Image: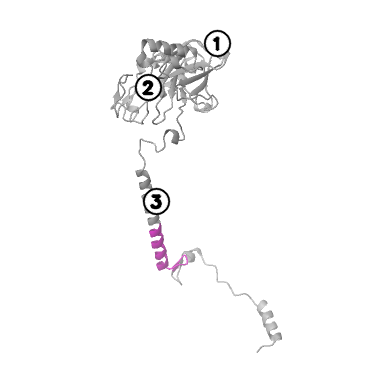
Amino acid sequence: MPTVAEESIDAFQNYYARPPERPKKKSLKQMIYDDETQQYFGRTVESWAKIGVFYTAFYGVLAALVAICMWAFFQTLDPRIPKWTLDGSLIGTNPGLGFRPLPESENVESTLIWYKGTHYENYKQWTDSLDEFLAVYKVPGLTPGRGQNIYNCDYNQPPPKGQVCDVDIKTWSPCTKENNYSYHKSSPCVFLKLNKIYGWIPEFYNSSADLPEKMPKSLKTYITDIEKTQPHKMNTVWVSCEGENPADQENIGPVDYLPIRGFPGYFYPYQNSEGYLSPLVAVHFQRPKNGIIINIECKAWARNIFHDRKERLGSVHFELLID
């Protein structure tokens, strides 16, 4: 049995012993395939085959499970009917209002329509923008399914199931392409569109005796006249455009709405039918004051449309400047 001194000497010698020699560095060719061990990247062919089979089976099963889950998920969806609608959706039940033409994409946050009335090259960007926006209304083939299921609707003739109402562009005169949408006369046309909400049904102000206090006086007078002369048109989402401030109200001048002052009720509810196009109202600013910015606010009026200027609910704001 070694003594303590001998153990100490052995430990000392082991501590200072030369470390074992490392194997020589292998070349890249040897790392890929070693002739001595017949291994590829440190593994035999059989080992690589087992790994390949395992991962092929693993990812194959995983892909199959994902495919089955996606198939089951899409079976719960309808390509035309949203899963969440109205109060259950993010959009909610209060439609917004949009306007065209919009400024160029470089000024995406701007809402200013600014041009020189007699300069064709200056107002051309606005008329070109309207041409592009209204193309689907003029050429049925640009909208999938449009032209096969169009129905000539009226207040007494709502569209049958599976058909959509026609939007008659002839009723927009003088807000037409042939007339440069009246931009060359410094009396531009702006088109309004109510945002689509699936299944939303407007609750109409269809009685002049029950109109909201904040509704503009001119619109109240219009509704009263329609009730007397064309009572069948009372089921309409009414529209008003006014200057936001007293100075704007003085500078905006007379305003005309084409074909009527609102969106006909027979276009609702929106059900994502093939070929559907939203109704439009052409707002013709006949004699706006030149050389000054006019702040304009347009509103849509129905009992279930609520207005919030800050959130732009039920309304839209834009500015008009004609030099």
Mark 3 neighbour class, 10 Å CA radius: few under 14, some 14 to 19, many 20 or more? few
Question: Mark 1 falls on what kind of element?
Answer: helix
Tell me the amino acid under the disc marked 2: Gly
> How is this picture coloured?
one colour
Tell me the amino acid under the disc marked 1: Glu
Q: Name the magenta segment's main secondary structure.
A: helix
Q: Residue 258, relative to residue 79: is it above or below?
A: above
Q: Confirm or deny contact between disc 2 and disc 1 (CB under 8 A).
A: no
Q: x%, y% of residue 223?
A: 42, 13
Question: Mark 3 falls on what kind of element?
Answer: helix
Point out the tag, 1 or 3, that comes first from the N-terminus. 3
Q: Is residue 47 magenta?
A: yes
Q: Mark 2 or mark 1, which is nearer to you? A: 2
Range of the magenta residues?
Answer: 39-58
Disc 1: which residue? 250
Query: Relative to the observer, which residue lies in front, 119 or 254?
Result: 254
Q: Residue 90, relative to residue 225: is it above or below?
A: below
Mark 2 neighbour class, 10 Å CA radius: few under 14, some 14 to 19, many 20 or more? many
Disc 3: which residue? 66
